[in-house]
C-alpha cells in the first residue's frame, strides 16, 4: 500500500523520502527516528515555510558518520527542487533528547538555506521538544512520546520568558538588525506567539498567536499585527528590503509592551 503523503506538496514529499532513505543508508541502526516539526507540525505552513526536522540517534555520531551525513545533505541541497534548500533541523543523541532540562550542548545542526552542517544549540529547547512530542509528524521510527518526556506549561513559560528577554536585549541594543521586511514582521508575530504561550502553556503557530493577540492585546496593536501577517510571502526578497519606517518604530515599542505584558523586567 502506498504511504500517505506527509505534506500537500509532492516535490517536498519526494525530498523528505530522499532524506529519510539517505539517513537509513548513512546511519543504519544508529538512526532512531525522524520527525517534521515547526510550522508543518503546528500548522499555518505555506510554500515559503522552512522544513524543520528533528533526527533522533542512539548516541553521539562518529566523525565518519558526520562526514557521510554532510555528503548526504550536500547532495540533497543541490537537488533541482527548491524545497531541498529549506531543510532545517538538528540531530539529537537519545540521552540529550530524553533529558527534561535542555543540555545546551551544541548539536549537529543544518540551518535553512545552507548545505553545511554546523554545531549549534538552536533546537535544544523545551519548545522544540514540546512541538515534536505533541504535534511532530512521524517520518521514521516510533512515536515521539516514546522518546521525549512531557514538557509542562510552567517549564514552557519559563523558557519563553528567558527567550523574550534575551532576544529583546539583542534587538534593542542594535535595532537596525531588524530593519528589513522579513525580520520586522517576524519579530511581531514571534512576540505574539510567545505571549500566547505565556497565556496558555502551549505552543501554537505564529499566525494562531497573531489571531489570539488581536483579541487579547490592546486594540492599538491590531493594525501592526495584521500587516505583519501579510508580509509572510517571499522572505528571500523581503530580507533585502528595508522595513516600513513606521512599522519598524512601532515594532520596537511593541517588543517593550510584550515584555511588560509578560512581566519581564529589563533595563530599557
Image: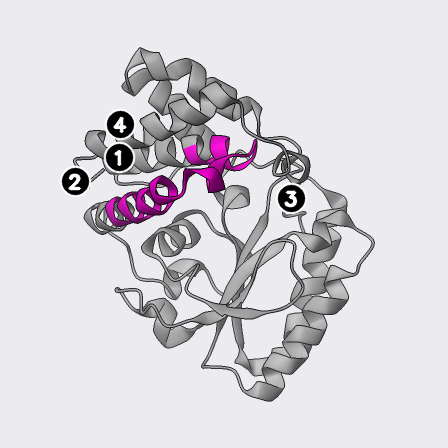
Mark toward the start of the polypeptide (1 vs 4): 1
Mark toward the start of the polypeptide (1 vs 3): 3
Question: Which numbered circle lies on residue 7?
Answer: 3
Where residue 186 appears, as percent x and y from the top left, is 48, 35
Residue density around tag 2, few if under 14, some if 14–19, many if 20 or more, within 10 Å: few
Mark 3 vs mark 4: in front: 4
The reply to whether discs 2 and 1 touch (Cβ–Cβ < 8 Å) is no
The reply to whether discs 2 and 4 touch (Cβ–Cβ < 8 Å) is no
Question: Which numbered circle lies on residue 265?
Answer: 2
The residue lying toward the viewer, choosing from 261 and 169, is 169
In this view of the protein, can residue 1 be seen by the observer? no
User: Which residue lies at the image location 33% right of the left edge and 38% below the top edge?
Assistant: 194
Secondary element type, mark 4: helix
Secondary element type, mark 1: helix
Question: Which numbered circle lies on residue 257?
Answer: 4
* The C terminus, quarter of image: top left
Mark 2 vs mark 3: in front: 2
Rounded to the nearest angstrom, the CA distance separating label 2 from label 3 is: 41 Å
Where residue 172 appears, as percent x and y from the top left, is 34, 40
Specify whether 160 is left or right of 92: left
Is the stretch drawn in magenta largely helix, strand or loop? Answer: helix
Mark toward the start of the polypeptide (2 vs 1): 1
* The N terminus, quarter of image: bottom right
Question: What is the magenta range?
Answer: 161-187
> Within the image, what quadrant is residue 63 found in?
bottom right
Specify whether 89 is left or right of 268: right
Mark toward the start of the polypeptide (2 vs 3): 3
In the rendered structure, does residue 179 fall within the stretch colored magenta? yes
Amino acid at each position: 500500500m502506498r504511504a500517505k503523503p506527509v505534506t500537500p506538496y509532492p516535490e517536498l514529499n519526494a525530498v523528505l523520502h530522499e532524506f529519510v532513505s539517505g539517513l537509513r543508508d548513512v546511519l543504519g541502526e544508529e538512526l532512531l527516528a525522524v520527525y517534521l516539526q515547526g510550522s508543518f507540525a503546528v500548522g499555518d505552513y505555506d510554500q515559503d515555510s522552512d522544513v524543520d526536522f528533528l533526527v533522533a540517534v542512539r548516541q553521539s555520531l562518529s566523525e565518519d558518520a558526520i562526514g557521510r551525513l554532510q555528503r548526504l545533505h550536500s547532495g540533497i541541497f543541490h537537488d533541482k527542487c527548491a524545497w531541498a534548500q529549506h531543510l532545517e533541523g538538528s540531530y539529537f543523541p537519545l540521552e540529550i533528547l530524553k533529558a527534561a532540562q535542555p543540555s545546551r550542548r551544541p548539536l549537529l545542526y543544518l540551518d535553512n538555506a545552507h548545505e553545511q552542517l554546523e554545531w549549534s544549540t538552536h533546537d535544544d529547547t523545551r519548545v522544540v521538544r514540546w512541538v515534536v512530542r505533541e504535534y511532530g509528524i512521524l517520518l521514521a521510527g516510533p512515536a515521539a512520546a516514546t522518546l521525549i518526556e512531557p514538557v509542562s506549561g510552567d517549564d514552557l513559560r519559563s523558557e519563553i520568558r528567558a527567550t523574550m528577554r534575551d532576544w529583546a536585549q539583542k534587538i534593542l541594543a542594535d535595532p537596525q538588525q531588524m530593519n528589513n521586511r522579513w525580520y520586522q514582521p517576524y519579530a511581531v508575530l514571534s512576540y505574539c506567539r510567545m505571549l500566547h504561550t505565556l497565556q496558555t502553556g502551549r505552543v501554537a503557530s505564529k499566525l494562531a498567536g497573531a489571531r489570539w493577540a488581536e483579541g487579547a492585546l490592546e486594540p492599538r496593536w491590531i493594525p501592526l499585527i495584521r500587516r505583519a501577517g501579510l508580509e509572510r510571502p517571499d522572505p528571500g526578497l523581503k530580507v533585502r528590503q528595508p522595513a516600513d519606517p513606521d512599522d519598524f518604530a512601532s515594532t520596537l515599542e511593541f517588543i517593550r509592551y510584550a515584555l511588560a505584558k509578560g512581566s519581564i523586567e529589563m533595563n530599557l
